[in-house]
Amino acid sequence: MNVKKLCCLVLCLALITAVFASCAKTKEDETSQPLETKQVTSDEKTDKAQTQKSDNETNETEADDMNHPKVQVTMKEGGKFTIELYPEYAPKTVENFLKLVNDGFYDGLTFHRVYAGFMAQGGDPEGTGMGGSKDKIYGEFASNGFSQNTLSHTRGVISMARSQNNNSASSQFFICYSDGCTQLDGDYAAFGKVIEGMDVVDSFCEHEMTYNSFGEKASPVEPIYIDTMVQVS
């Protein structure tokens, strides 16, 4: 074999080797994320979604099973609204409120303090903000060492009024007009929410107001009377 033919043979062998090497590299690149791995990743996402769905369904079932008493408030000048109570946040507060409702304590009392954009307060037999019922209750809120109450003071939420004494609440309550009341979280015992008829509570703000003893223009000139408060469930 002459030198020219030998050089051609060596060149051909080099080309063949390069082609095999290229094919092997391409095959390795294609399988760098095998289909099995992609399938496992997809299954994990599916399992996670199914687990989350199951957890949500469990939470919804637990919420449905929870006893949430409801109280219907009928106003003397017309209109009704319904409050749903949440004993899981403030059990003693709910118990005290329902006792007063069922005793007819609130019938004929007023909303004596109506602060537009903030809250409407009622439940004082004196109608001045200084009265209350006979029994005082423990303040079920975080700053009083009761961490269980995480209900935020958002629009429609009902909470207990009190003096500077954490354990001075009795019968007076207030209903939040806005989410701005969340500044009260942890310092007052929120225990329910208006779930129907919030427009009736809003209508209190249409009344003419005069100044109260605290210097707020939040005292209705004409009393806003509660006709009845009745537990309906």
Image: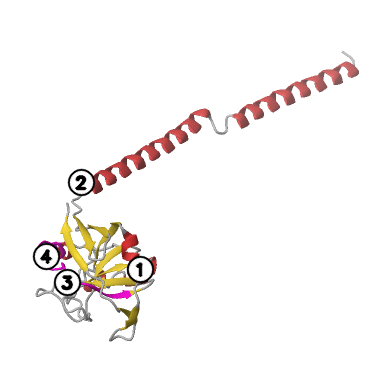
How would you rate the neighbour count of disc 4 (Cα within 10 Å): few for under 14, some for 14-19, many for 20 or more?
few
Q: Which mark is residue 182?
A: 1
Identified by mark 2, the residue type is: Asp
The 10 Å Cα crowd at callout 2, few under 14, some 14 to 19, many 20 or more, is: few
Q: Earlier in the sequence, mark 4 or mark 2?
A: 2
* Pointer 1 or 2: first along the chain: 2
Toward which corner of the image does residue 30 lie, by quadrant?
top right
Q: Which residues are magenta?
A: 95-114
| Residue 162 visible, this orientation | yes
Q: Is residue 100 inside the magenta stretch?
A: yes
How far apart in space, not on screen, are marks 4 and 2 (Cα)? 28 Å
Q: Are marks 2 and 3 in contact (CB under 8 Å)?
A: no
Give the side of residue 204 with respect to residue 230, left or right: right
Q: Amino acid at mark 4?
A: Gly
Residue that label 3 marks: 171
As drawn, the label of residue 65 is 2
